[in-house]
Amino acid sequence: MNRKNGIWAVVIICIIVAAVLCYCEAAGIFGLATDISTGSSEAEQLQFSKNLDIWFMLMLVAFLMIFIRKFEWGICLAVLLSAVSSFVVYLAIQDFIFEYGTWDQTLLIKAVICAITVVIAIGVFSGVCKMWQYLFVGVAFAFVYALVEWLLGNVTVAGELATDPGGSILVHMCAAYFGLGVAMAIRDKRAFDEPMYTTTHSVTFVWLASMLLWMLWPSFVTSLLPLESVTQGTITCYMAGVGSIISTYFVCSAVQGKINSLTFTYAMLCGPVAIGAPLLSVGPWGALLIGLIAGAVSALCFIYLQPWFTKKIGTMDIMGVHNLHGVGGWMGAIFVSIIVGSVASIAMAVVVFVVTLVLGYVVGLIVRVTRGEMEAICDDDTDFVRTEAPAEVSAEAPAASEA
C-alpha cells in the first residue's frame, strides 16, 4: 500500500470506528445490558473446547496455504485480517439484525465457522489483491454467509430443509464459490504465469497443518450437534477421513508415479469435507466408502481438472480450493440426497452455488475497482519489512569462514 492509499485507509477506518463508538455510546452497548450466558451447562462446557479447536483449525489453514516460497507472511496476515473482520461483523449481524439474544458458546462457534469459511475462500485469490482489501472481503463475506445460513435454515424444498449438519454446503461450497466469484471478477492473468516455487521447509508446514486439521475435524463438524449425536458424528468423520487418505495415496501413486505433497495433503481432507452433509445419515462403513470416493475424486481433480477448469473460467484458483472444498461440497450434497431420498440438499446446493458465485463476483468487482495497480502478486516484499541478509551476503559468509 502506498502512502496516499494508507492515509485514506486510516481516515476511513477512523470514521467507521468513530461512528460505531457514537452508536454504541448512544445505545448503551458499552454497559452490561447484553445478556451473556454463564456457560455452566454441560453442553456449553463441551463447546468451549471445540470453540478453541476451530480457532486452532483456522490458524492451521494459514499454514496449509503457506507453500509459496515468496508469499508466506502475506498468507498469514491475509488470514488474520479476513478472519477477524468476518468474525466481528457476523456477531454484529446476529446481535443487531437477527436479535440473537444471550451470547453463548453456540454464537461464538457460529462466528468462528463464518471466519474459517472466508479464510478458505481467500485461498482462491490469495496474493492478487491489496492486503487491506482482505478486511473488506471479510466484512462483505459475513453478510453473504449470514444470508446462506438463513437460506439453509429456512427455505424448504418439497417440504424439507437441506440436510447439512457438518457444513458440506454451508461452509465448503460457500467458501469455494464465493472465492471463485471474487477471483473471476479480479481476473489477474499474471497468476497463470506466476512461478509458485516451494521449499522443503514451507511444504513441511503444509504436511503438519493437513495432519492436524484431519485430527481436529470432528470438533468442527460436531460443534453444534446435540450431545447424543457427537459420538456418531466423530465416528463417521474419522472413517471418512481414513478412506480419503487411503484412496488419495493410491490415486497419486498410480497416476503420477510419486506422491505430489501438495496434492496429497489437500485431497486427503476431502473425506471430512464430503461427510459433512451425510454426517448423521450414514454408518461407519458407509462413511469409509464416502471417504474413499471423495479422496480419489479430489486427487483426480487436482491432477486433471485444475488446468482445464482455471483456463475455462479465466482465472487461477491459487490454492486449488475448488478441487477440495467445491468438489467435496457437491459430493456431500449428492451423497446425502441419495441416502435420505430427498432432493432438498442438492437443490439447496445449487442455490448456494448461484448465490455465492454471484455475490462473490460483486464483491470482486469492488475489490478490482479499489485495488489500483499491483506491481507484483503473491509477494511478501509488497507489504513487509525484511531483515534477512541479502543473498550475496549469505553466499559470502561461508567463503569468509573457510578463508
Image: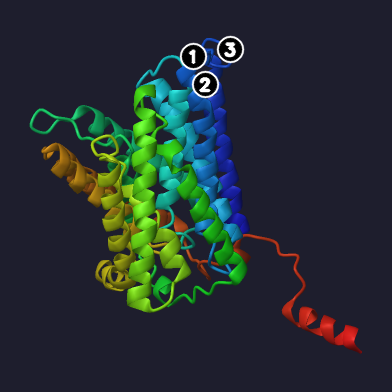
Asked whether the viewer can see residue 357, the reply is no
Residue at the far front in the pictured view: 285
Relative image position of residue 330 (x, y in whole percent):
24, 51
Q: Earlier along the polypeptide chain: callout 2 or callout 3?
A: 3
According to the picture, the residue beneath numbered tag 2 turns out to be 45
According to the picture, the residue beneath numbered tag 1 turns out to be 41
Tag 2 and tag 1, C-beta contact below 8 Å: yes
**Position of the C terminus by quadrant:** bottom right
The residues tagged by marks 2 and 3 sit, at their Cα atoms, a distance apart of 26 Å
The answer to whether 210 is drawn above or below residue 189 in the figure is above
Q: Amino acid at mark 2?
A: Gln
At x 42%, y 21%, the residue is 95
**Closest to the observer, 127 or 50:** 50
Q: Amino acid at mark 1?
A: Ser
The answer to whether 81 is drawn above or below residue 200 in the figure is above
Q: Amino acid at mark 3?
A: Gly
Relative image position of residue 180 (x, y in whole percent):
32, 57
At x 53%, y 60%, the residue is 206
> Which element is circle 3 on?
loop
Q: Residues within 10 Å of mark 2 (few under 14, many from 20)?
A: few
| Residue 356 in the figure: left or right of residue 136 | left
> Which element is circle 2 on?
helix
The residues tagged by marks 2 and 1 sit, at their Cα atoms, a distance apart of 6 Å
Mark 3 or mark 1, whichever is nearer to me: 1
Mark 2 or mark 3, whichever is nearer to me: 2
The residues tagged by marks 3 and 1 sit, at their Cα atoms, a distance apart of 25 Å
